[in-house]
Amino acid sequence: MRAKQPPRTVAYCHCEDCRRVTGAPVAAFAAFDDGAVTWAPDEGRRVAVNPGVTRTFCERCGSPLTGWYAYLPDTVFVALGILDQANDLAPSIHAHAASCLDWLRIDDDLDRITASARDELNDTGAE
């Protein structure tokens, strides 16, 4: 994957769907303009299980790659773990914080939005 610009934002997501798709107690994604990202050899296999959500997975290893959400059009959310620059892309917000696992403790002072954080993501330019 290559991007023509830095991500609009980087976010943690604590929702059950993201936990299940990543197999982790919390997911982290970088939001890019959809047209700013290119894939080689391709973007992976598209899967749409939940209404309004399309995800892609690597066809060779099965790793989650991206997510598209109908309520955030023209934005692609790329799984932070697949990016070589992940160490330089610290999340700036927690989405779906009300769904955070009781035992998970992430010690930071980031905003914790109880639900989807769509308004906050749109405020950072992810529309």
Image (cartoon, grey):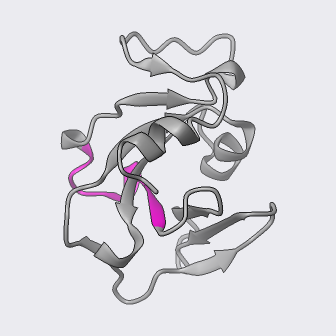
Would you say residue 81 sits in the magenta stretch?
yes
Is residue 37 visible to the viewer in this orientation of the structure?
A: no
**Quadrant housing residue 24:** top right
x 63%, y 37%: residue: 116
> Horizontally, is 46 left or right of 16 in the view?
left
**Quadrant housing residue 70:** bottom right
- Report the number of discs: 0
Q: In this view, does 60 lie above or below 80?
A: below
x 36%, y 11%: residue: 109
Q: In this view, does 108 lie above or below 45?
A: above
> Residue 7: x percent and y percent?
28, 54
Is residue 82 visible to the viewer in this orientation of the structure?
A: yes
**Which range is magenta?**
75-86
Residue at the farthest bottom position: 41
> Horizontally, is 73 left or right of 96 in the view?
left
Of residue 1 and residue 52, the one placed in the foreground of this image is 52
> Horizontally, is 16 left or right of 113 in the view?
right
> Horizontally, is 49 left or right of 127 in the view?
right
> Residue 18: x percent and y percent?
64, 45
> Residue 23: x percent and y percent?
64, 44
> Residue 33: x percent and y percent?
36, 66
Q: In this view, does 23 lie above or below 15?
A: below
For the N terminus, the quadrant is: bottom left
Would you say residue 124 sits in the magenta stretch?
no
Q: In this view, does 68 lie above or below 96?
A: below
x 64%, y 11%: residue: 103
